[in-house]
Image: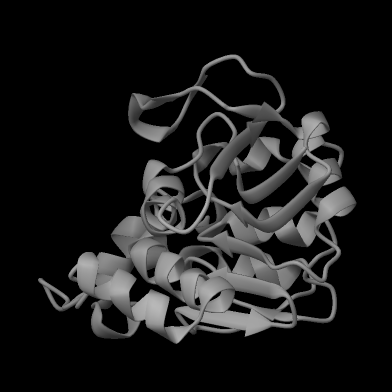
C-alpha cells in the first residue's frame, strides 16, 4: 500500500512524539500508524495504541516519522523497525524523527554523513554513533528532518506541513493550533537550566549515565 504519512510505532514510544505531529499531519492527509503487527501496543505512560498497518504492508510513503521514547532501545540494528527504515527511508521522500527517534534513524544508516539533532540528553550518544550533532530544535539535512525533545512535537508537525503543502497551509495550521510557544518556567532549554536541575534529569536518563 501507499501511505501519506507513516508514523512508526513501537512499545514504549512517547505519546507526545506521535500525537503532537499527528495533530497537524492528519489535517493534510491520512496518517498510518505502522508496527511489527496489528496487535495493540502500550506506549510510554500506559497509553494504548492499535496500529493500522504492518511494516510489510507499506511499500510507499510520502513521509515517515520516527518517535523517540523509552522503548527506542528495542529498535536495534537488527530490528524490523530499522529494516523498514532501510527499505523505505533512503529518499527522496522526507523522513523525520523527534527526540531519541534520531538514534533509530542512525541505526538505519539514514544519518550517515548528515547533521542531526535530538533530545539534549541523547546528543552525546548520537555523537558516539558517528553523527554530527546540533543543538537546533529542528534541523533538515537533505531529505532527513530531525527534531529535539518532545516539546518540539507540534512545531515539527507544522514544519512538515510546510514542507509538504507550503507556507499558506502551514500558516493556517499554526493559527488553528494557536501555536505560539513560551517557556512557562524559563527552563525549556538546557542552556537556561542550572547544573543541579540538569543533573537530576540526567540521573534518570539511559544515555546520560
Residue placed most toward the observer, 43 or 90: 90
- The residue under the point 36% across, 24% down is 46
- The extreme left residue here reads 184
* Image x and y of residue 8, in percent: 63, 43
Quarter of the rendering containing residue 150: bottom left
Is any part of residue 133 visible from this angle?
no
Residue 12 vertical placement versus 188 (above, below): above
- The residue under the point 84% across, 43% down is 59
Residue 50 vertical placement versus 20 (above, below): above
- The residue under the point 43% across, 65% down is 157
Q: Is residue 140 left or right of residue 89?
A: left
Q: Quadrant of the N terminus?
A: top right
* Image x and y of residue 67, in percent: 54, 50
Residue placed most toward the observer, 41 or 63: 63
* Image x and y of residue 107, in percent: 79, 55
Residue 128 vertical placement versus 134 (above, below): above
Residue 206 vertical placement versus 71 (above, below): below
- The residue under the point 11% across, 72% down is 185
Amino acid at each position: 500500500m501507499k501511505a501519506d504519512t507513516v508514523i512508526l510505532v513501537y512499545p514504549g514510544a512517547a505519546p507526545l512524539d506521535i500525537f503532537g505531529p499527528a495533530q497537524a499531519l492528519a489535517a493534510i492527509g491520512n496518517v498510518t500508524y505502522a508496527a511489527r503487527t496489528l496487535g495493540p501496543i502500550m506506549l510510554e505512560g500506559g497509553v494504548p495504541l492499535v496500529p493500522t498497518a504492518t511494516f510489510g504492508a507499506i511499500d510507499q510513503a510520502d513521509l515517515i516519522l520516527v518517535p523517540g521514547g523509552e522503548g527506542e532501545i528495542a529498535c536495534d540494528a537488527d530490528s524490523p523497525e530499522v529494516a523498514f527504515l532501510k527499505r523505505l527511508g533512503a529518499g527522496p521522500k522526507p523522513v523525520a524523527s523527534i527526540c531519541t527517534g534520531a538514534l533509530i534513524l542512525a541505526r538505519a544508516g539514514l544519518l550517515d554523513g548528515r547533521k542531526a539533532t535530538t533530545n539534549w540528553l541523547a546528543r552525546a550518544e548520537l555523537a558516539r554513533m558517528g553523527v554530527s550533532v546540533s543543538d537546533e530544535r529542528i534541523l533538515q539535512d537533505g531529505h532527513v528532518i530531525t527534531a529535539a525533545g518532545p516539546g518540539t512535537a507540534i512545531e515539527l508537525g507544522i514544519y512538515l506541513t510546510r514542507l509538504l503543502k507550503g507556507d499558506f497551509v502551514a500558516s493556517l495550521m499554526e493559527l488553528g493550533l494557536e501555536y505560539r510557544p513560551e517557556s512557562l518556567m524559563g527552563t525549556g532549554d538546557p542552556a537556561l537550566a542550572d547544573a543541579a536541575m540538569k543533573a537530576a534529569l540526567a540521573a534518570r536518563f539511559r544515555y546520560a549515565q
